[in-house]
Image: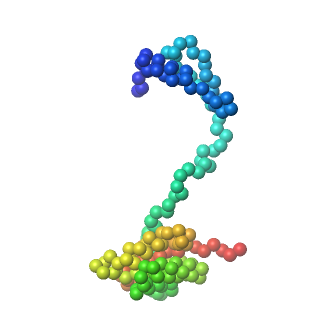
Amino acid sequence: MKRPPRQDEMRLWGMVTATVRAKPTQKAVGWTPKAQKSLESPTTLQPMAPLLVDPKSLKPAGKPRVPGPLEGIEPNRKRKIAREHTPLEARLDLHGLDQDRARPVLEAFLRRAWEDGHRAALVITGKGKVGMGVLRTRTPEWLAGPALRDIVAGVSPADKRHGGDGALYVALKRRPPKV
């Protein structure tokens, strides 16, 4: 519970409010100052007019939202990809490429697979030395980046039969129908 203001605080507040004046061209809407008989009475505000703009429609100021890491593929969808008896048609092997060459190859491959109507792709990165290869660590970052964000739905590690820790399943979003 808030305590009531003390006498010295009210006197100080009265001195502050006595020095504040609105500019004549920019008067505040919805309130009028009441005449004070002494410096000890607090300044009161009249209720403001209702807000005419819906606050939910306003966009927050500041930096644009940066997309975070991609979510994993839904369990049922991943199970269907991993247990298919037919091999994945969209398959890319990045072995032998450095990261400067691998990124544009990955982006072009996934765009082409998405345009061809594929819903999933297998990207083989390899494990690298000591299990922490450059392509293995950078590929999820590239998939979450703005160049592929509009077509990639999720990423999950591949099943052992498809490369295990050295490969990724990439779920692709549905392509909108051509109009």
Up-down: is 8 above or below 178? above
Residue at (50, 20) in percent of width and height: 15
Residue at (51, 79) in percent of width and height: 104
On the image, the x and y values in percent for residue 90 come to 50, 84
User: Can you name the residue that lies furthest to the top here?
Assistant: 37
Residue at (45, 79) in percent of width and height: 100
- Asked whether residue 77 is in view, the answer is no
On the image, the x and y values in percent for residue 65 come to 52, 58
Residue at (30, 81) in percent of width and height: 129
On the image, the x and y values in percent for residue 21 come to 60, 26
Q: Quadrant of residue 164?
A: bottom left
User: Can you name the residue that lies furthest to the right here?
Assistant: 179
Quadrant in the picture for the N terminus: top left
Q: Is residue 179 left or right of residue 40?
A: right
Q: Quadrant of residue 113?
A: bottom right
- Asked whether residue 112 is in view, the answer is yes
Up-down: is 127 above or below 45? below
Q: Quadrant of residue 130?
A: bottom left
**78 or 143, which lies in front?**
143
Quadrant in the picture for the C terminus: bottom right
Up-down: is 53 above or below 27? below
Q: Is residue 33 left or right of residue 78?
A: right
On the image, the x and y values in percent for residue 72 come to 44, 69
